[in-house]
Image: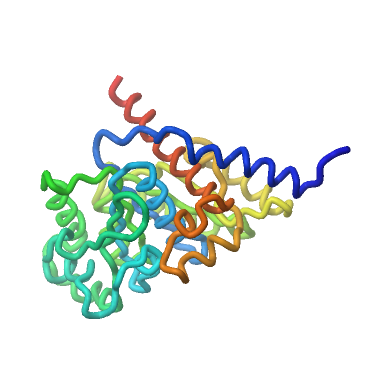
Amino acid sequence: MPSSPLARELGELTERRRILDRPAPPLPVTTRILTVSNQKGGVGKTTTTVNLAASLARLGARVLVIDLDPQGNASTALGIEHHGDIPSIYDVLVAGADISEVMQRSGEAGTLFCAPSNLHLAGAEMEMYGAENREYILKGALDRLLASSQQRFDYIFIDCPPSLGLLTVNAFAAAREVLIPIQCEYYALEGLSQLLNTITMINAHLNPDLRVSSILLTMFDSRTRLAHEVADDVRAHFPQQVLNTVIPRAVRISEAPSFGQTVVSYDTSSVGSISYIEAAFELATRGAAAAAGGNQ
């Protein structure tokens, strides 16, 4: 008697949960700095940032999240205090503080820190405009952090606001990789060409080393033909960059931030958590393979 779709789904999830017992993927030889960006809002950008960071920390990496979005949603999801009196990334960008002075350790499993945002960041761009080398303020702060032998990080994720302003330009100037979450819905590629044009300009004028290393398909509903068509379309346009893992629409993913947690700690064995852990494995493994290829 053939099994029902639900039974097959549960069987597949049980099989996928074995990833929780797999040996951790290799750590990068040098710090990977990734800007998570998409100028189209509502694509799961912050959700992707915090859950990939939490997954990699759970797998043994030292991880830092820099919350560059004035809304502070990444800080909230990582359980980090970020009201107006708390030192934040604003103090780094405007007052010259060191990142080590403002970052806080998250309660997530593993070694995961966050340099939080707060509402002061909304006015930071105006205050930064008169600064010398204003596009490189964040890069300079990260260079100082990584120069300290006591502050070794394997991954640094920068969560950007969904707009192209000086905060996002600072993120692009500081990073080496761009990770783009794309929602598996109509108009998924809307704005992507603009983002790619922006990266081309950043390459030409500010950061020649920046590249789109990864694209992650999010909010995937396997029951709809549209989701499959969008996924196929994105893979056809970007065959090298798209991760095999897709992130489904899942209630647990949406619930977790309200508890000050990522889905990885909120419900580790849920389909949303397993999907992000799979994506983290893939991100780490691809990075190791690229590094090995570059050293040959």
In-front residue for pair 89/27: 27
Residue at the right extreme?
1
Q: Toward the viewer: 179 or 106?
A: 106
Residue 72 image position (x, y, % from top left) = 35, 71
Asked whether the viewer can see residue 229, the reply is yes
Image coords of residue 210 (percent x, y)? 31, 45
- Frontmost residue, 88 versus 22: 22
Q: Relative to 205, does residue 97 appear above or below in the rendering?
A: below
- Quarter of image, res 92: bottom left
Q: Residue at x 49, y 41 (%)?
A: 20
Q: In this rendering, is residue 34 above or below 159?
A: above
**Is residue 244 placed above or below 126 in the rendered structure?**
above
Instruction: Identify whether 153 is placed above or below 185.
Output: above
The residue positioned 12% from the left and 71% from the top of the image is 95
20 relative to 129 in the view: left or right: right
The way the protein has been coloured in the rendering is: rainbow
Q: How many marks?
A: 0
Question: Which residue lies at the image location 29% right of the left edge and 65% below the top edge?
Answer: 167
